Image: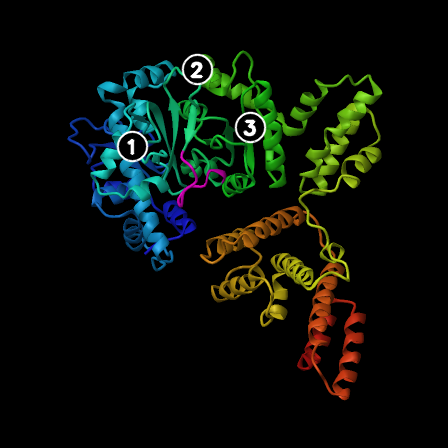
Amino acid sequence: MYFRNEDIEKLLDSLRIEEVVGEFVDLKKSGSSYKGLCPFHADTNPSFSVKPEKKICKCFVCGSGGNAINFYSKIKNIPYMEAVKELAQKYRVNIKEYNAKNTDIDNEKFYQIMEDSHNFFMDKMFAQESRTALNYLSNRGLDTDLIKEHRLGYAPAKWSELYDFLKEKNYSDEDLLTLGLIKQNEEGRIYDTFRNRIIFPIYSISNRIIAFGGRSLEKDDTIPKYINSPDTPIFKKGKNIYGIERAINIRNKNYSILMEGYMDVLSANIFDFDTSIAPLGTALTVEQAQLIKRYSSNILLCFDMDKAGKSATERASFILKSQGFNIRVLQFDDAKDPDEYLKKNGREAFLEVVQKSLEIFDFLYELYSSEYDLTNIIAKQNFIERFKEFFAYLTTDLEKEMYLKNLSEKIDISIDILRKTLVEENKKKFIVKDYIDEIEEKETEKKEFKKANNLELSIVEMLLKKPEYYEFFKDEKFESDIANKTLKFFEEKIKENFNFESNNLMREFENYIRNDNESHSEYINSNIARIILNYVIDTEVKIEEKNFLKLFKDYFRVKVKLRDKTNDDFQKIVYFSKFKDKIEKSRSVEEFIEIYNSFKYLF
């Protein structure tokens, strides 16, 4: 038994956490929150807090808490997925249950190992040996309550303390190696991956422990300051975001704050900026941007103020613009990063920085103009060239025109010249060329197959923009998996009476393809990115019907090539010749379909 992430999100959105917790804890209103005695330890003073607006609960003594599912799982002492099932039934939330396959059973085991490891790290945080860790966090402004609230932990300096603890629970070496919790040297010796480090838990969107980040407390500069869990069956560094378990706040407030590191995010949350998130030690990826976009298209970039931080802001802005984000950039005086600024100046000063934030184009203009002497003709030309990559990632003509006008006014150069330089001559690297231009007539049979797939991908894009054309293609058999899965997607959504005019069509499609257990080939993953990107780019552009008609005719020509290999009698060949002429002369998609259906029997 298992449930998909989007269904778990749906359940969490539907549940009133104060109602779930209130069944087991006597809660009393306290401002916008509720308080009661913690059910997980011998509590004498109300230390268990429930915050309905954030959909979380927390004990400030023992650290227990999380979302409604976490709470219910722990209080009932049942597996997480069993808690999902019971809560969905109890509160009548309609989500679909899937039969557990081996991979899902393994994943549940991995989640349990990570939870046990996290509990081990949290227990060690307040042991005698963790003095250095507590002193470090205290110097960074985190007291005992905040450490417990954010469930930070400590990995002991001993070589195999975590390993010994997990072996007592009968976990296998193979599973612990898979999760990156231990390592094995050439002599076969096993040792803990995280040693003498502060542990930052990394959660999934459904608030389950999937990985750890560790900050070293060693004074040895040769030891990496930060390390993260490696990619595992339940964690992909380039697809997860630190702090994403608070996505409900991003959705409710309709913006996120993207920061660089763990401490930046923790500091922001301490000061009640609870939409703060961070990449996991790497540059922002397209997959991470797509994850954030599920909750809001508005984002504040809040990176360090050094050269590296400004460069990271520039790179992140390109990725975010390719996904259609509205971006503003925060800049700080007299502080190297947001963490330091908040500690020095507090919440109100940070709010002033937000109010003075720069729209991304203005930030890039200031950044680039500081690097060039604009009174010099050659330097000015190079300065303009710097904007090429930015314009390459813009997704709408409206944005391009607005930014071109802005730049034209700032540097006193004709908007037409700038358009030619930055847009017309600046083809997007990530846009796939037209499938007909990609392939020459004399290519091999292997390349012919690629041509068919490119055509089918373009048909998939068309169907997502014009779902009514599904009726024509529903009985067709495509070469590529992704095209056939698209037809299956439409078939299932029609059965569900899905509203195809809904803004959620693309999200539903992406989830359907990515969650299909058979859809994890490199081909599927690379081309789903193309489809999504092109869909986003075209949302603001009115696509002319002649482009759709061209697709229908090109698909027809591919079918004709395949049919020409058959041996027909003379009369059938004559009929087919007339049929082809009529198809080629059709002037609309409707006319094409009418003619095609009249002669469909010839295929």
Q: Answer with the quarter of the image where residue 180 lies.
A: top left
Tag 1: residue type? Lys
Query: Which residue position is annotated with label 2?
Result: 343
Residue 538 is a magenta residue: no
Crowd class of label 2 (few under 14; some 14 to 19; many from 20; radius 10 Å): some
Query: Which residue position is annotated with label 1?
Result: 58
- The quadrant the N terminus occupies is bottom left
- Height in image: 251 above or below 596? above
Q: Residue at x 27, y 41 (%)?
A: 71
Residue situated in front as seen by the camera: 385 or 518: 518
Tell which circle, 3 or 1, labels the residue nearer the N-terminal end.
Answer: 1
Crowd class of label 3 (few under 14; some 14 to 19; many from 20; radius 10 Å): many
Tell which circle, 1 or 2, labels the residue nearer the N-terminal end.
Answer: 1
**Badge 3 element:** strand
* Res. 81 visible in picture: yes
Q: Residue at x 32, y 39 (%)?
A: 114
Indicate the position of residue 223 as horizontal and vertical percent values. Answer: 42, 21
> 106 left or right of 304?
left
Where residue 301 is drawn, which disc sits there?
3
Q: Residue at x 38, y 58 (%)?
A: 96
The span picked out in magenta is 229-238
Tag 2: residue type? Lys
* Res. 59 visible in picture: no
